Amino acid sequence: MMRQYELVERVKSYDPNADEGLLDRAYVYAMQAHGSQKRASGDPFFSHPLEVAAILTDLKLDDATIVAAVLHDTIEDTAATREEIDRVFGPEIGALVDGLTKIKKLDFVSKKATQGENFRKLLLAIAADVRVLLVKLADRLHNMRTLHYVPPEKRLRIAEETLEIYAPLAGRMGIQEMRDELEDLSFRYFKPEAYETITKRLEEVTLKNGRLIEQIKKDLSARLSERGIEAVVRGRQKRPYSIWRKMERKSVAFEQLSDIFGFRVIVKTVDECYRALGVVHTTWPMVPGRYKDYISTPKQNDYRSIHTTVIGPGHQRVELQIRTEEMDNIAEYGIAAHALYKEGRTGDGSTLANESRAYQWLRRTVDLLAEGDSPEEFLEHTKLELFHDQVFCFTPKGRLIALPRGATPIDFAYAVHTDVGNTAVGCKINGRIAPLLSQLQNGDEVEIVRAEGQVPPAAWESLVITGKARAAIRRATRAAVRRQYAGLGRQILERAFERAAKAFSDDKLKAALPRLARASTDDVLAAVGRGEMFSGDVVKAVYPDFKEEKKPNAEGATGQGWFGVKGGGFKFKVPESGAPAEGRSAIPIRGLNSDLPVRFAPRGGAVPGDRIVGILTPGEGITIYPIQSPALAAFENEPDRWLDVRWDVDDANPQRFPARIALESINEPGTLAQITQVIAEHDGNIDNINMSRRTQDFTDLTIDVSVWDLKHLNAIIGELRAKPIVSKVERVTG
């Protein structure tokens, strides 16, 4: 166990101005607070926070973060309180310890909704001060190093949680060394057989190729030295989990991997990076497609380096990473290597956001929390971004956009701006028109074609990759649906107030909001449109003295066009095209592509020419039924749901409407062909066919067709009746 003076010496080695007294107080306080507590290994519990602090000293973090690491379990596992921590160590350290205490309670392998909500809380905690994440990652790393003391079931759960949440977060923050170790430790317990197999194979390859690796290092160092480039060349071996992921992703065997060994070339300047690349490429042939320049286009976690693969000595493929010392430092320690930590200005979030791409990603991800996604969807989308590699694309003006691999121009549009995504109707990739669902490649120049007033289709949500795009599409879809319901609600209320002989206006509606328990007039309109609030209740709220008069046998409520409803004595007028008075008070129906949330009767539909009635279904809008539909009997005792509707077909933009016909046909070869030929010759469109053998000689068919109007439907039915193979045909109306 690390002693008190050792902790101070470790911090002082990289920060001579560290507060020695603060470190001493934290050591003594935590040791006394944890007392005789033991870990699963039998070691004193206090050894754990000390090991966490030691990991963070390797990252050269400020003394406040080290103190928070020493104290991070005190509030959760001892009698210490937040108030006491604030008093003894100050509010900054108190906030860090409190944030870590909240994170410790989170469970990421519970059911999906809880897991997602906990992930939200984690990101909110670390966004306030990213040092909370650094301490938590160090805490998780030490726990993983001692995971063999934990019971097997809990061990598996912790390994899975680390692999899904903490290792990717470490990668996104650019702390690659920590990510690699977290992944390998998780892999050891999560897939023990695969881990053991790959580890053995790596040992065999190391023994076999040890001399070759040394030869490559010497050759490379000599070549660079000849050109006057002072460089440090380090050989490295690919990690077991990284190898396993590549084997899984590319479906290749271990023997087919060509980059198990790699070399890192560390030089002093950016200029020397490119000079070293020139030396390498003029000495050994480059493998096409294996060159990446992350210096000119850094990754989102601040990673910068040149990657290339060449055919080296012995016809061995050699993977090289060329970078400066500063780039190497950032590659290993990520956001922890940021200069702000060394200067004691960690609270300056705006400066950190300007200088750190990793922190910018974290802030953007936290911004998505305000978009109203469900917790499980938020977790799913963020995991996608955590695990995906990146592609780098450009706008026509040269702006660089980094996206997850597999992203589409739709993702690109939303990455540029939400309004660009919402109004996107097409795109050009490298100057050529391309589908919006094309998969983008590194270096693509993408131009988005826009159309004002466009609403993104809801289907886009399942086709995009980035969480920002999915959240924006869902938000735009919700807004469009709300506008539809609000429009329907306004029409319903206008007609309700007209029937009540009362004036309707937004101002009057606004004055009645307290009585309707709604925050805005749009909320009322949408609620009426969704069927959550009845129009009569709104009339009474606006005019409290209004009394609805119900006349069961009102004069004039007889004759053609009127029909009765059992229970309640109401009568409803079916609107007719030739009755202007009723036409004005009825809601116009154009079809499925209108601004109103409309659908047609599920068993039979309705077509222009039918006498129709609308039924308001809560949360679904209007369902249109032909007046003769037997299904209307189910709504006899719900008169508030019945709406006057009328056809308002646009002759300039004709639409097809759904209908259903039932046939009895003779069972002989070619019967179905003759029936479908009749429908096709009459310009009908078959949506669905169901067939059942009634007897050996007869078959029953139910056909869903799309037609222009009632005349069109009757022509098809008449032609089918004339066919000798058809014994009976009739329309189904529900």
Image (cartoon, rainbow, N blue to C red):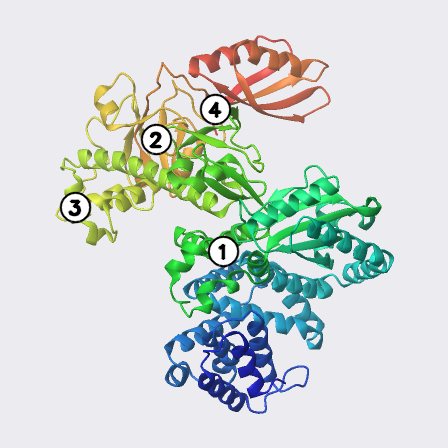
Sequence-first tag of 4 and 3: 3
Sequence-first tag of 1 and 4: 1
Which residue is label 1 attached to? 358
Disc 1/disc 4 C-alpha distance (Å):
53 Å
Give the SS element for disc 1.
Answer: helix
Q: Residue at x 20, y 32 (%)?
A: 554
Disc 2/disc 1 C-alpha distance (Å):
35 Å
Indicate the amino acid at tag 4.
Pro
Residue 67 versus residue 522: which sits nearer the camera?
67
Which quadrant holds residue 628?
A: top left
Disc 4/disc 3 C-alpha distance (Å):
39 Å
Sequence-first tag of 2 and 1: 1
Which residue is label 4 attached to? 658
344 is higher (above) or lower (below) than 580: below
- Which part of the image, by quadrant, shows the N terminus? bottom right
Q: Badges 4 and 3: C-beta atoms under 8 Å apart? A: no
